[in-house]
């Protein structure tokens, strides 16, 4: 009999990176505070630089952890050199990220699950469940899209309404 429930362990695993980075952020702020107290300009600049870098890493890791992805859905997602491939019993496919015209997230119920990525390219679309194995790599791949913010993805993933959110569109 496990000590913790599987859901609790999954949540702890998802948030371990932000927790680890938060410890380093606290250490860099402590280093900055010590430099200010001792009136050391050099240590202060080092502490400020450390706090800035670690703070930005903390922000990105927090946003990544906020995007909850389970891996119990149908199919497998593979991302290699901007090539997205979705292996599935039905409606699988492959596309190049450079050919992406529009990226949407659907919260409408479907046979694949409650949340699906819709990747539009010339000539069609590729629908990938957010719960597919390896779907977490999609968010990392989408980071290469110009003018795409994690906040749009987080809001769409946390939405309780049933609709299709346009996350990114080429030319906008």
Image (tube, grey):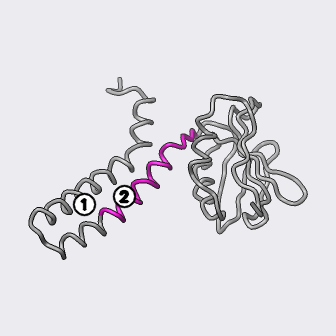
Query: Which residue is under mark 1?
Result: 28
Q: Which mark is residue 114?
A: none
Question: What is the quadrant of the C terminus in the image?
Answer: bottom right
State whether residue 108 is above or below residue 146: above
Residue 64: in magenta span:
yes
Residue 150 location (% of width, % of height)? 57, 52
Q: Quadrant of the N terminus?
A: top left
Neighbour tally class for label 1: few under 14, some 14-19, many 20 plus, Cα within 10 Å: many
Query: 65 left or right of 17?
Result: right
The structure residue drawn at horizontal position 18% and vertical position 72%, both measured from the top left corner, is 43
Vertical arrangement, residue 22 with respect to residue 54, above or below? above
The residue that label 2 is drawn on is 55
Q: Residue at x 18, y 62 (%)?
A: 31
Disc 2 to disc 1, how far (Cα)? Answer: 9 Å
* Kind of element beneath mark 2: helix
Q: Which residues are magenta?
A: 51-70
> Is 141 in the magenta?
no
Compared to residue 74, the image places residue 50 above or below, namely: below
Residue 170's x, y, as percent? 77, 61
| Precedes in sequence: disc 2 or disc 1 | 1
For the residues bearing labels 2 and 1, Cβ distance under 8 angstroms: yes
Residue drawn at (79%, 50%) of the image = 126
State the residue in front, 17 or 94: 17
Question: Farthest bottom residue?
Answer: 42
Q: Quadrant of residue 80?
A: bottom right
Q: Position of residue 44 (x, y in %)?
A: 20, 69
Look at the numbered disc 1 and give the secondary structure of its residue.
helix
Q: Position of residue 56 (x, y in %)?
A: 41, 60
């Amino acid at each position: 009999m496990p000590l913790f429930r599987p859901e609790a362990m999954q949540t702890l695993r998802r948030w371990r990176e932000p927790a680890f980075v938060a410890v380093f952020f606290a250490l860099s702020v402590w280093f900055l505070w010590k430099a200010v107290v001792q009136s050391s300009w050099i240590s202060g600049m080092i502490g400020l630089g450390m706090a800035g870098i670690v703070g930005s890493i903390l922000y990105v890791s927090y946003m990544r952890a906020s995007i909850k992805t389970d891996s119990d859905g149908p199919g497998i997602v593979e991302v290699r050199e901007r090539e997205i491939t979705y292996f599935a019993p039905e409606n699988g496919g492959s596309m190049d990220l450079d050919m992406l015209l529009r990226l949407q997230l659907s919260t409408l119920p479907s046979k694949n699950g409650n949340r699906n990525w819709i990747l539009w390219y010339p000539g069609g679309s590729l629908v990938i469940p957010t719960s597919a194995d390896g779907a977490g790599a999609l968010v990392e791949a989408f980071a290469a899209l110009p003018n795409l913010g994690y906040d749009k993805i987080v809001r769409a993933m946390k939405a309780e309404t049933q609709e299709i959110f346009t996350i990114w569109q080429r030319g906008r």
